[in-house]
Image (tube, rainbow, N blue to C red):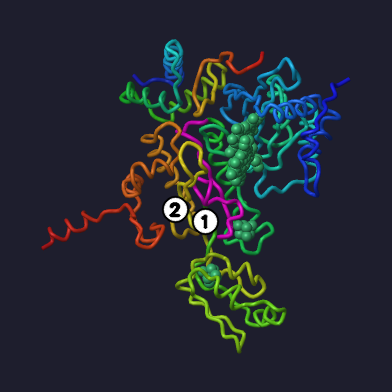
Amino acid sequence: MPKEYKTPMLDELEKGPWPSFVKEIKLAAKNSPMSNDLLGLLERSYNERIGHWKHGGIVGVMGYGGGVIGRYVDVPEDFPNISHFHTIRINQPSGWFYTSDALRTLCNIWEKRGSGLTNMHGSTGDIVFLGTKTDELEPIFSELTEAGFDLGGSGSDVRTPSCCVGPGRCEWACYDTLKLCYDITMRYQDELHRPAFPYKWKFKMSGCPNDCVASIARADISIIGTWKDDIRVDAEEIKNYDKAGMDIFNDVVLNCPAKCMKYDAKAKAIEINNDDCRHCMHCINAMPKALRPGTDTGAVVLIGSKAPIVEGALLSSVLIPFINLDDEDEREDFFDLIEEIQDVWCEEGKARERVGEFIQRVGMGNFLEAIGVEPIPEMVAYPRDNPYVFYEDYYDDEEEDE
Amino acid sequence: MALTVEQIADEMYKQVEEAAQVKKKLKPGDLTKTMIKLHEDEGVDKKMCKAAIRELVNNGRCVYTYFGGSFIEIPHKEGASND
Ligand code: HEM
Ligand code: HEM
Ligand code: SF4
Ligand code: SF4
């Protein structure tokens, strides 16, 4: 008979109209002694205001250096069922498409060999299995392999690449995010499972500047769809928005960050100066029936973002302003550049230094020189900002010419 | 004489062993850099070092560990474990 824990503090978190993780853990606890002990431990932590977890660094599966994150409770005598509570990251399919059969398979493995608790999906994008014992790791790995799944990344490796649903469901997708995500995953299998970098190395792909996977804020390499030509306008649909009561001037035109839209209130017509458009998606999000991205589409590649861990947060900045990833040659150039960056960062980067921090330390100008890329105006993050690039060489050349 | 992947792996293993004796941990990158520095003229390159590390880990002589960064170590019991 499993121990029954009184959980008045946790019970508070079941109240209200929103989903509750307490409700879910209680459900799992009916079949899982691990989830049951987790309830007891959590209640105790809430009472004592002390966390009772220890990080491990060694557990994993044979041959791999990533995918398993070791956790142990520091009061195993009181909660023996969660003495080990390791997390497993499993590489999610591009865009998170599953058959119900695949989901059932995953859940069956996990109810048999772990707590039954999952996180679909972690912020990393992975399928996250929460809580199992060291002895179960190899059996879980082989059952997952059998079912066609593989572990994801953790530690100083290529982290599981992730992408937005892209052309799978979204009409704004400017390139095939699902395909690129799959291709990067397959190309860097070795780097994904065998950590060899100074620190984590993340690729995230969004099909348009709405950036649904937040790649600009948390990927070392952010690949964001965009277009080169004009925003497509359906004049009739603009009139329909007006008829339906939309305040087009105040809510769309005035909110354009580039101030590049004009509205003719009489004719109910929008005019866009596309040369100044910043591709922010605001107007398109506001009037999806009337406005759409152009048709000459591709992606911007940006580098260097990270969430705050050792140092503060960084956003990615532009590396390649436009690339057509459907073109084989341009794709190969992209991968060559990525591998050049990896080499430079591995050679010169310090331990636990993300590539964005590395660029800050050595300066963007020096970094670009090391990877053999010419600085261009698109790399300047803000107007009149210091682009870290000096032009002495150019002056020297001119003097010699004279 | 060109070194084989097995010879590189053996020498890396010794480095990992020596480092452990003075409570130091080595990263895959450290091992690779050292081996190239010592044996570049014997044909040792990044690719061979990668293969050597893969061999060390695949046959269980070494394991990957994570303590803020990823390291290559000889399997041992960890402090945090409750075994
Ligand atoms: C003060 C305590 C803690 C803080 C501030 C903290 C913070 C974080 C943060 C910021 C992340 C990254 C989220 C992301 O972007 O994916 C993370 C991930 C994670 N943490 Fe913690 N954490 C704490 C304690 C714990 C504990 C006690 C456990 C387990 C017992 C744990 C397990 C994990 C796991 C498994 C992940 C990866 C989840 C995923 O892949 O989505 N953490 N933590
Ligand atoms: C003890 C305190 C905290 C713990 C244990 C913790 C843990 C975590 C974990 C496990 C995740 C990943 C969730 C997932 O897999 O989806 C996460 C994500 C996140 N946490 Fe926390 N967190 C803590 C405090 C905070 C605080 C104080 C903030 C903000 C002020 C914060 C902001 C975030 C954000 C923005 C994410 C999403 C990150 C992303 O999408 O990449 N967390 N946190
Ligand atoms: S990032 Fe753009 S293309 Fe991708 S799902 Fe979001 S809106 Fe659609
Ligand atoms: S996409 Fe943004 S910047 Fe471009 S016209 Fe629309 S609101 Fe203005």
- Residue A55 location (% of width, % of height): 60, 25
The one nearer the camera, B12 or A46, is A46
**Mark 2 or 1, nearer chain start:** 2
Residue A317's disc number: 2
| Secondary structure type for disc 2 | strand
Q: Quadrant of residue A40?
A: top right
Residue at image point 35% right, 25% down: B36
The one nearer the camera, A24 or A93, is A24
Would residue A190 be found to the left or right of residue A37 on screen? left
- Residue B57 location (% of width, % of height): 54, 21
Disc 2 residue type? Ser
Task: Point out the image quarter for the C terminus of chain A.
Answer: bottom left
Q: Label 1 crowding class (10 Å Cα cut-off): few <14, some 14-19, many 20+?
A: many
Q: Which residue is mark 1?
A: A325
Q: Numbered disc 2: what chain?
A: A
Task: Point out the image quarter for the N terminus of chain A.
Answer: top right
B35 inside magenta stretch: no
Would residue A32 be found to the left or right of residue A51 on screen? right
Q: Quadrant of residue B5?
A: top left
- Residue A12 location (% of width, % of height): 79, 39
Residue at image point 71% right, 37% down: A148
Disc 1 residue type? Leu
